[in-house]
Amino acid sequence: MGHITFFWGTNTEILFPGWPGESFSCYILALIFVFMISLTVEWISHAKLIKSGISNVASGILQTLMYAFRIGLAYLVMLAVMSFNIGVLLAAVAGYSVGFLIFGSQVFRNNLKIEPYQDLSDLPPLNC
């Protein structure tokens, strides 16, 4: 029986039965994995990967595939957080936060003035 309240500890199961096990190093690896998945969700959410000039059909298919990939990763993060481990929760929040800082905020945009109506990504915002 898993936990139904938040707890702090390295003996937990995240996503798969028996993973990461009772090893502290595997637990740290699992936290890095959750961090990287949530960072990837933010990257995909703010990426401009579809080049202009391709057909609307091809663009729509690529956009749909990107959306499905992003939602799949976001659900994996949600399921990981449902392990109720505080370390996993902190890794997910840190990944989303660092991802937004790098890909979504104004920090790395070279003084580019952005109007509110400008769309800088291929996908709509991620909704809860």
Image (spheres, helix red, strand yellow):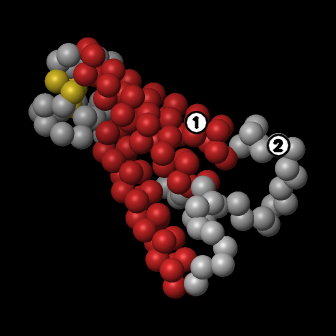
Is 49 situated left or right of 78 in this image?
right
**x, y (%) of residue 35?**
44, 34
Q: Which of the numbered marks, if any, corresponds to residue 110?
A: 2
| Viewer can see residue 5 | yes
**Dot 1 crowding, Cα within 10 Å, few <14, some 14–19, many 20+:** some
Q: Which of the numbered marks, if any, corresponds to residue 97?
A: 1
Q: Residue at x 40, y 59 (%)?
A: 69
User: Is residue 52 positioned above or below 66 on the image?
Assistant: below
Q: Amino acid at mark 2?
A: Asn
| Alpha carbon separation for disc pair 1 and 2 | 20 Å
Q: Amino acid at mark 1?
A: Ser
Please name whichever residue, 56 or 33, is drawn nearer the observer in this view of the structure.
56
Q: Secondary structure at mark 1?
A: helix
Would you identify the image quadrant in which residue 17 lies?
top left
Q: Residue at x 63, y 60 (%)?
A: 48
User: Is residue 14 positioned above or below 67 on the image?
Assistant: above
Would you identify the image quadrant in which residue 13 lies?
top left
